[in-house]
Amino acid sequence: MDERASAPRDDSDPNALPLPEARRRILAALDTVDEVETLSLLEAHERIARARITAPGAVPPFRASAMDGYAYRHAEGGERLRIAGESMAGHPGPDALAPGTCQRITTGARVPDEADTVVQQEDVQRDGAAIVIDEAPPMGANVRAAGSAGIEGEVLVEPGDRMGSATLAVLASHGIDRVTVTRRLRIGLLSTGDELCEPGESVGRGQIHDANRVLLATLLRGPLVEPVDLGIVADTPEALVERLATASRLDVLISSGGVSVGDADHVREVLADGGTVSLWKIAMKPGRPFAFGRLRDGPVWFGLPGNPVSAAITSLMLVMPALTVMAGGVPDEPSLARAAVLDEPLAKRPGRVEFQRGRCHTDAQGTLHVSGVGAQDSHVLRSLQRANCLIELPASSPGAATGETVTVLRFEDLGTSPF
């Protein structure tokens, strides 16, 4: 029996853009911020590079030992070899190696010029000031060539590269201590609605506490972003125009609420009067009432839905890639999708791609399973708190039955997701 929990009514909207097309249009409309800054390697972590960096020299700059042992000529491996000095890491021995001799050597130390092999210390017998090799390694064994970890002139960083830990370590290994990156993006966060009050305040009749600014500030906060709190704005065009006058120094304005079709939803109209609205409505759930545009001579604008789950998911799918592009980087795909077996039926109407909150786990056989987390309404923040993944159901899907394979987007794949 098909346990699919679905309703037959179609949920499509001919005026709503498919999510991939909306993402393409948004990213194509963005410019990279011009201003850069030069930072230390520790300060530059996860920032976006804006200049090519090439290796100033070879790493290592000399032949180095990969083992603690003895450096010698491989052709003399059958002889009794006199120990003629030692080469320690940071304290190299003599460059020259006389015939019939070897040097005691430690890992990372310079290999003398005439030596072509290092035998590890466990494979020799020490005989006073000499050694006898019990088991000779192949010629060239345990000798790291100069430049084996990096050659002079090699491109280490290209503009647009994200400065991850390994990249920063590579730069440090080449003696580079500073990198030029895009400055942080100034992101203004604004909530609209007479029903909203600040956390910590007493709610009046018909009011709720605003959670969206906290949610979005922590979701989007990171090395690329400097959040600016613009507070709550009343549901009047005049109040919104007054608040927008303070947004000129921002790179991005993100508002939540006021972009739907209600009598008090003024944000889209006000923004259209003061700039351009390039798109409105996305064929996704949650998150259909989503707008994108730009203030005249001002910041890029994202108009997010007022319901917090919708605001979070549209930010993950559309805002975060846009911020990466504005910082000069190349956005990752929204997630590394994985297949999971559904443990319970999911309800859905065809017409929009839907991201339901779920919990996934791996069974004893290594198979990934997933189930829902209860109510999927877009105002239920607890569904985000309980979840560890999003279950992606295609626009054509009429729901999914127990045992079906579905696509899940693990939160750790989204990088900075706080859920």
Image: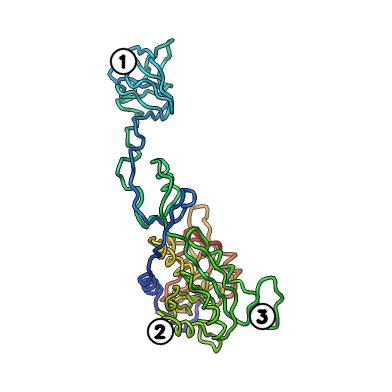
Query: Which sits earlier in the primary sequence, circle 3 or circle 1?
Result: 1
**Whole-percent x, y for residue 259 in the image:** 50, 81
Say which amino acid is labelled 3: Gln
Residue at 53%, 62% in the rendered image: 221
- Residue topped by disc 1: 98
Residue at 49%, 53% in the rendered image: 365
Spatial CA span between label 2 and label 1? 83 Å
Q: Residues within 10 Å of mark 1 (few under 14, many from 20)?
A: few
Q: Give the mark count.
A: 3
- Residue topped by disc 2: 15
Whether residue 360 can be seen here: yes
Residue 114 location, quadrant: top left
Which residue is outermost to the bottom?
Answer: 263
| Secondary element at image label 2 | loop
Q: Nearer the viewer, residue 332 or 353?
A: 332
Say which amino acid is labelled 2: Asn
Which residue is outermost to the left?
Answer: 75
Whether residue 1 can be seen here: no
Residue at 46%, 48% in the rendered image: 41
Q: Quadrant of the C terminus?
A: bottom right
- Residue topped by disc 3: 207
Spatial CA span between label 2 and label 3? 32 Å
